[in-house]
Amino acid sequence: MESLDRYLNFIRFLLPRGKQEDIIAELSEDLHAQVADREAELGRPINEAELEALLKRCGHPLMVAARYQAQQQLIGQPFYPLYLLALKMVQWVLLPLLLVIGLMLSVFRPHMVDAMMQAVGNAIGSAIFTVGLLTVAFAVLERLQVKLHFLDNWRLSDLPKVPVIQDPSQITRSASFGGFAGLLFFIVWWVGLIRLPQLPHVHFLQALPEGFFWPVLLVAGAEMLLHLVNLFLPWWTRRRAAFRLVLDVCSLVLLAAIATAWPWFAIHMDAGMTADIGPSIRDVAKLEQVVNLSLLVSLGVMALSYVARLVQDLRRARGLPAYWNWLMAMFAN
């Protein structure tokens, strides 16, 4: 029943992460039993209107979720679950949006790195200010005992369609295939079977020492094989999580070693090339600076991803469920 699943999924979204599965399993069993009893009385399958009436007797998802949450002193019921929903919107929508916009705008400013750091600080500051404002607003509403009429007069169609939380032990085949294909292309390029197009009389200098060749190739090859296994056996086991944990550590060590060789990009032009095309030494230096800063930011994002993956793999290797929040969803799986 799509409407019943939508009702339960919204309740799941409002519950504490560690209690979701047990509570939803209990609610689902109870609601399906009520539906079965009602269908036995009617002698036919229940229709949408009758299902909605049954669920309305159970209560709005906000009120149902509130029954399983500890009583709060500052913000009480029924405002507390609505307050938690607002905080999740700040965490999953507002903060990422401010970060993306701020980082995109900082690329066009004179001092890009300083502007990026300022953008991150501004985004976090704005999110903290919003949380404080929401806390005061809900505390005032609770003290004034404002009546929330929508908790009594609601329809199933009014409930938002929140994303279904994926089973953390499952691995999507699309992610495994994409990881396998991406690493295969990288390895083919890394060993020199394909090369990027070169401009005439322009040479891109590679700053990485030759000693990085085999370590990078071995780590990339091992992770490619792991993606291949996950493609046919799409669930996490403790052994596979421990294996990827070792790859995470090796990858972070390699990234740290590569960072010591920064800057990695430089341009060398043959004699007379500058006179033919007209780029000044200052223009070339500016291009090198932009490319090297972009590569450094990419390296930082990769490092964050491996740190997040390391945390997830450490928990899976210990037999614990992986974390699920917007940060982990963005950087790790």
Image: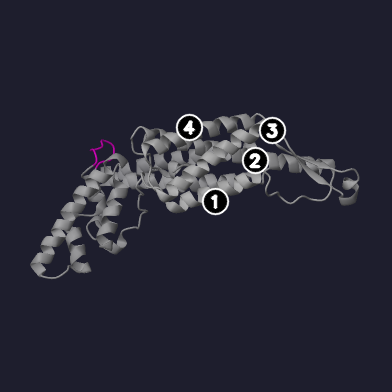
Mark 4 or 2: the one toward you: 4
Mark 1 or 2: the one toward you: 1
Q: Distance between the residues labelled 2 and 3?
A: 19 Å
Q: Residues within 10 Å of mark 4 (few under 14, many from 20)?
A: some
Q: Mark 1 points at which residue?
A: 181
For the residue labelled by badge 1, is the local secondary structure a helix, a strand or a loop? helix
Q: Do the residues bearing badges 3 and 1 touch, measured as CB atoms within 8 Å?
A: no
- Image quarter of the N terminus: bottom left
Q: Residues within 10 Å of mark 3 (few under 14, many from 20)?
A: few
Q: Mark 2 points at which residue?
A: 295
Q: Do the residues bearing badges 2 and 3 touch, measured as CB atoms within 8 Å?
A: no
Label 4 amino acid?
Val
Residue at (22% x, 57% y) in the render: 152
For the residue labelled by badge 4, is the local secondary structure a helix, a strand or a loop? helix
Q: Is residue 325 left or right of residue 181?
A: left
Q: Name the residue under label 3.
A: 210
Q: How far apart are marks 4 and 3 (CA)?
A: 23 Å
- The reply to whether residue 67 is visible in this rendering is yes
For the residue labelled by badge 3, is the local secondary structure a helix, a strand or a loop? helix
**Which label is found at residue 246?**
4
For marks 4 and 2, the one nearer the N-term is 4
- The reply to whether residue 122 is visible in this rendering is no
Q: Is residue 112 left or right of residue 59?
A: right
Q: Residues within 10 Å of mark 2 (few under 14, many from 20)?
A: some
Count of picture labels: 4
Whether 303 is drawn above or below 10: the answer is above
| Highlighted range, magenta | 69-76
Q: Main secondary structure of the magenta part?
A: loop
Residue at (44% x, 50% y) in the render: 231
| Residue sitting nearer the eye, 319 or 134 | 319
Where residue 49 appears, as percent x and y from the top left, is 21, 68
